Every structure is written in structure tokens, then in C-alpha cells.
Image: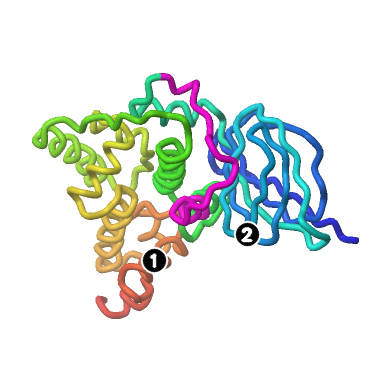
Amino acid sequence: MNRGRVVMHRSAVAGVQATTADTAQSFGRHSHDAFGVGVVWRGAQRSASGRGPVEARAGDVITANPGEVHDGTAFDERGRAWRMLYFDPALVYDVARELGVAAPTAIESVRPVLHDAAFFSDFEYAFAAVAGAPDVFDEALARDAALYALTTRFVRGHTTARVRIPAAGPAGDASASIRRAKERIDDDPCEPVTLEGLAAEAGMSRFQLLRGFAREMGLPPHAYLIQRRLALARRLIEQGMPLADAAAGAGFADQSHMTRAFMRAFGVTPAQYAGAVR
């Protein structure tokens, strides 16, 4: 019988490993040094964990703590399929500190199986960021934001952490901080930017930046960055620059990246736009 396979993907993010499995294989008792979060998307399995017997079915979110011993057996010969992300504990602890957790290194996941549709959705987006989806995640800023959103939801909703959301400061101070982040993008939209770097520019935590930027600008930072690059690309195209050069000049990874962004924003390709304005 074909037992299926397990694939470890080349990760686009340091400290995060992505794995896909579609198999009927039974796994013996083992553990990981990382926080594991994942989703079952076909079939079902039984396992023993440090938190007791577990059954997980398609649509469920599954978790494992660092060092937690567990195993896994499919319900039947058809097997099961899942996707997992393994986070270096330091990454999770860092997010917990930003959320005001007093003892971040003591936190752990409280349930091995979750029924959380919003978490499932965030996971799928973050998995694509790590495992590689170039039509969505050309930019480090987009990958950073996707992973940070997932880790924040995990720490806030599914661990022992007692979260104390850091205050954003007086409204005027917050607005000034967001303005600095916006100006960092406006000054040179071609320059690569990370979530951590943008938060440092604003003098805020990553959580404060993401929340405040979306509130004040109406877009998350990565979407705003793409809008600024599109505006620059349009000007370059209007000036008669070849499309490949316009893509590079506006900070896109390549012409296909610019084309995807044009189609999402305007419903036309850069070539169609060039034909209309030249």
C-alpha cells in the first residue's frame, strides 16, 4: 500500500519550518524543539500527547508544545493530510513580550486540538508565506505580517499567557509614530522594508504598528507599500519607460510581480495601461 509522504519545504523565514504530510503512516512517540501549529485538511488521526488522548479531523487546528512527546495514527487505511508550521520558541516568546506577557518563556499551548475558523484562515495565509507563494508574498513585509498575525492570535487565544496589550500612547503620539512609518515608505517605496524595521522607525511594537497603521491609513503597511509602488510604476510607464524597467524602478521583484499587482488593483495589465496613456 502507498503510505504517502511527508515534505519539508524550503522556508522563506528564519526560525520557521513548514511541513506538509499526506500519509497513512503511523508515527511513533517523538517530540520537537519548537512550537508546532497546523491544520488537518483531509482524513483524521488519533494520537497520545502530554495533554492526553487526542482526535483531530479535517478542519481542526492542531498544536504541540516544545518537548511534548506525542505520536500519531490514522483512523483508517485512507490516511490523513495536514500542514504544520514549527516556530523556534524564541520567536513566540518575543511576540508574547510585545503583548505584555509577564513570563513569556513559561507559556504553553493549552489545547492540542482547536476549533477556530479564524485561526485556520490565518494559518493557511502564514503557511503560504513560509512555504512560498510568490504571487502573494513577494515582499518580506507581507511575510512578516502574516506570521506575526498568526503568532499573535496563537499567544492571545490559545496559550496560558495572560496578555496585557501595550498602550499605544496618547492619540497625538500614536499619529506621529504612524506618520513616521508612512514617511519611511513614501520617501523610498523601492527600498525593501521589514515589519521589525518599520516598527523601529515608528518607535512602536509590531502589534501597535499594525493596528495603528491600518486604523489611520485604511490599509496595512504592506498594502500601502504596494500602492506607493504602483503609483511610481504608473508614472514611469507614462514617461515611456519599458515595462521591465518600470517594474525594477518601482521596486517590484520583476515584471510579473508588477503585472499581478496591476491586475489586483486596476483590473488591467501594465501593457494595457501603457497602451492607453502613451
In this rendering, the answer to whether 273 lies above or below 157 is below
Identify which residue, 150 or 45, lies in the foreground.
45
Q: Which amino acid does label 2 sit on?
A: Ala
115 within the magenta span? yes
Which numbered tag is attached to residue 243?
A: 1
Kindly report the distance in space between the C-alpha atoms of the residues bearing marks 2 and 1: 44 Å
Start-end of magenta stretch = 103-124
In the shown orientation, is residue 101 left or right of residue 61? left
Q: Residue at x 25, y 49 (%)?
A: 214
135 within the magenta span? no
Identify which residue, 200 or 128, lies in the foreground.
128
Residue found at the far front of this picture: 52
Residue pointed to by mark 2: 58
Residue found at the far right of this picture: 1
Q: In which quarter of the image is residue 22?
A: bottom right
What element does badge 1 sit on?
helix
Percent coordinates x, y for residue 154 in the rendering:
46, 40
Q: Residue at x 11, y 37 (%)?
A: 171
In the shown orientation, is residue 264 left or right of residue 115? left
Percent coordinates x, y for residue 114 in the rendering:
54, 48
